Image: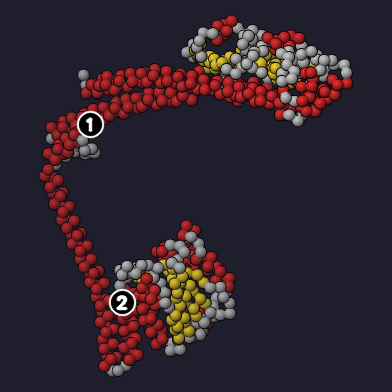
């Protein structure tokens, strides 16, 4: 037996069969669980329906209790004849008082109301109805000593089937067991219970009265008729539910009896309607498990085929080596045991050639490394020589200026040296505002030498400068921009610049103002619109057109986020004012 066949047999015996057995047990147990869940769900729906009908009759009993104490009805029950004026006066009072009672709100559920006195005087809300002797006798027979109400059966009228409900009348003055109120109810409340409380379009509800007749059935021709003998036998077998039909068309027959009405509610519903989602989940789970088993088999079968092919390839390479071809090479694409065999075989065949190749590679790498080291040394020397050369040159100039007592040249050389050191030594992109202002003062010393008329005004809260974060070289471009565009572009010499700063809440606001030609109001607003944009809406191609101010704003916004950055004051009549908002940081001592 080949290795491939052995692997296949192991997969079938130790993987497929156990999985299939577990799946069979799970299906059997889950089916039983689904049936129990469906049964519980059906019983819960049935209980909800029975409670709804009982609540309806309890509410009806409460509302009709007002009729028993209505003065006009009490007078009617005491009448002895229907031929005098008193009868008609009493009947009119009854009609008036009923419209003001709670029973009037149930006009949708009530077909008509009949009042019957002990003398068999009859008043009906339907004036064309006379005494129904059969219904009256049925009401007398249904009366019990401990109840003031009774529920009859189905009565057929010209308006369709109705349900009779009795309220037995008596008061403390006039007592007659034959006096009563018969209320004929429409069956709409039972249809509503069937439609709203139970599953729609699944099964049907039927209600059987104490006498075994149908009180409610979807087939209206069966109302008031005797229920099937087979159904009556099931109602008295002592069980609340039973299962009928085959496995595919299995039905659940649920029975519950109402303590209030004495009716038996019967709900016949297919199992699939109650357990549809659960069965669907069972089918999906079964399909997934079977699919996983097939996938595992496919993967393991493919793996077995892959192993056998690799072994056959190794055999082929060994035959070529036996024939004298020492340049063959087994593929080293895996790091498993077979890959280890391939690598060992390759090392045995190409040991000498590999040593030569490694030596050549080592020489080439050594030459490349030596070249890179020489280039790096040259770069380092250049970065060290150029700044030091300039520093030393400025120091020589400063020394000669001191010796010759030329103070302006000395001051200019010192300021230029500090300016250059601050600009070149940019290892730390973040500085505090005190460092940035020291750099600006050096810059102003140099500008003043070029423009002696330039006056600079500083109004700063110096105690906060060390606690304000700033990006390096953020202010110099703005001052250059003010001198160039505010004065020099208009042919004016820079004469006045003001730098003011103050703490505002958790930020520090710095203002750079000039007395130059200023900017048009439309241009100021366009700049402010660009400065207010969030980073997600930046279009670097277009925003670069805003020049140096945009570059400074971009660096501050990218470093500190919103709301920090630049804003231009809207003003006309000359001059420009740039406001820079920077964040506060904790003191170093803290």
Within 10 angstroms of label 2, few (less than 14), some, or many (20 or more) residues?
some
Q: Residue furthest front?
A: 173
Residue at the spot 56% in from the left edge and 69% down from the top edge? 525
- Residue situated in front as seen by the camera: 20 or 277: 277
Give the x, y percent position of residue 235.
55, 10
Instruction: Tell me which colouring the rendered structure shows.
Output: secondary structure
Q: Secondary structure at mark 2?
A: helix
Q: Residue 19 at what x, y percent from top left? A: 32, 22
Marks 1 & 2, CB-CB < 8 Å contact: no
Q: Nearer the viewer, mark 1 or mark 2?
A: 2
User: Distance between the Cα atoms at labels 1 and 2?
Assistant: 67 Å
In the picture shown, does residue 421 fall above or below 535? below
Residue 314 in view here: yes
Q: Which mark is residue 459?
A: none
Q: Let me know if residue 182 appears in the view.
A: no
Tell me where residue 390 sits by quadrant: bottom left
Element on which disc 1 rests = helix
Quarter of the image where the C terminus is located: bottom left
Residue labelled with disc 1: 310
347 left or right of 389?
left
Q: Is residue 49 above or below residue 522?
A: above
Q: Quadrant of the N terminus?
A: top left
Foreground pick, 115 / 431: 115
Residue 98 sits in quarter: top right
Q: How far from the left and from the top, in percent, is residue 325?
A: 15, 36
Q: Toward the viewer: 385 or 405?
A: 405
Task: Tell whether 431 sits left or right of 174.
Answer: left
The residue sitting at 14% across, 34% down in the picture is 321
Q: Which residue is mark 2?
A: 421
Label located before the other in sequence (1 or 2)? 1
Q: Residue at x 38, y 84 (%)?
A: 446
Q: Nearer the viewer, residue 137 or 407?
A: 137
């Amino acid at each position: 037996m080949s290795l491939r066949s052995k692997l296949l047999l192991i997969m079938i015996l130790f993987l497929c069969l156990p999985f299939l057995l577990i799946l069979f047990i799970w299906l059997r147990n889950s089916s039983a669980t689904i049936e129990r869940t469906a049964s519980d769900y059906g019983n819960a729906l049935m209980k909800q329906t029975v409670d709804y009908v009982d609540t309806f009759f309890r509410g009806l009993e409460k509302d009709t209790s007002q009729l028993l104490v209505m003065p006009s009805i009490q007078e009617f029950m005491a009448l002895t004849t229907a031929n005098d004026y008193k009868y008609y006066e009493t009947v009119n009072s009854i009609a008036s008082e009923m419209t003001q009672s709670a029973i009037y709100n149930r006009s949708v559920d009530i077909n008509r109301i009949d009042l019957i006195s002990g003398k068999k005087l009859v008043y009906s809300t339907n004036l064309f109805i006379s005494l129904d002797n059969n219904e009256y006798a049925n009401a007398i027979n249904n009366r019990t000593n401990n109840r003031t109400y009774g529920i009859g059966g189905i009565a057929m009228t010209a308006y369709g089937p109705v349900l009779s409900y009795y309220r037995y009348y008596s008061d403390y003055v006039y007592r007659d067991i034959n006096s009563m109120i018969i209320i004929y109810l429409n069956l709409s409340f039972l249809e509503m219970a069937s439609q709203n409380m139970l599953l729609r379009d699944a099964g049907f509800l039927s209600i059987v009265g104490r006498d075994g007749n149908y009180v409610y059935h979807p087939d209206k021709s069966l109302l008031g008729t005797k229920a099937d003998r087979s159904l009556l036998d099931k109602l008295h077998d002592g069980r609340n539910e039973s299962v009928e039909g085959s496995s595919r068309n299995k039905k659940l027959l649920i029975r519950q009896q109402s303590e209030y009405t004495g009716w038996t509610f019967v709900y016949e519903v297919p199992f699939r309607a109650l357990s549809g989602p659960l069965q669907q989940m069972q089918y999906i789970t079964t399909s997934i498990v079977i699919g996983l088993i097939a996938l595992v088999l496919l993967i393991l079968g493919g793996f077995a085929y892959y192993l056998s092919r690799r072994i056959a390839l190794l055999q082929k390479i060994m035959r070529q080596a036996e024939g004298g071809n020492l340049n063959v090479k087994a593929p080293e694409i895996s790091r498993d045991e077979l890959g280890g065999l391939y690598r060992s075989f390759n090392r045995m065949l190409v040991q000498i050639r590999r040593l030569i190749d490694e030596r050549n590679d080592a020489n080439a790498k050594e030459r490349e490394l030596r070249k890179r080291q020489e280039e790096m040394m040259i770069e380092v020397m250049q970065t060290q020589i150029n700044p030091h050369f300039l520093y030393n040159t400025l120091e020589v100039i400063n020394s000669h200026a001191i010796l010759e007592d030329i103070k302006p040249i000395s001051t200019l050389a010192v300021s230029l040296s500090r300016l250059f050191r601050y600009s070149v030594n940019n290892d730390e992109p973040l500085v505090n505002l005190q460092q940035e202002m020291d750099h600006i003062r050096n810059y102003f010393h140099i500008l003043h030498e070029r423009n002696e008329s330039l006056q600079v005004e500083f109004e700063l809260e110096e105690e906060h400068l060390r606690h304000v974060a700033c990006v390096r070289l953020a202010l110099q471009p703005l001052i250059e921009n003010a001198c160039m565009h505010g004065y020099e572009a208009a042919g004016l010499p820079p004469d006045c610049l003001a730098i003011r700063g103050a703490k505002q809440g958790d930020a520090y606001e710095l203002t750079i103002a000039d007395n130059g030609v200023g900017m048009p109001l439309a241009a100021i607003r366009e700049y402010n619109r660009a400065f207010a944009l969030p980073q997600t809406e930046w279009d670097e191609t277009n925003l670069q057109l805003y020049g140096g101010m945009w570059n400074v704003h971009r660096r501050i916004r990218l470093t500190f986020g919103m709301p920090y950055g630049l804003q231009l004051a809207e003003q006309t009549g000359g001059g420009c004012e740039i406001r820079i908002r920077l964040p506060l940081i904790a003191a170093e001592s803290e």
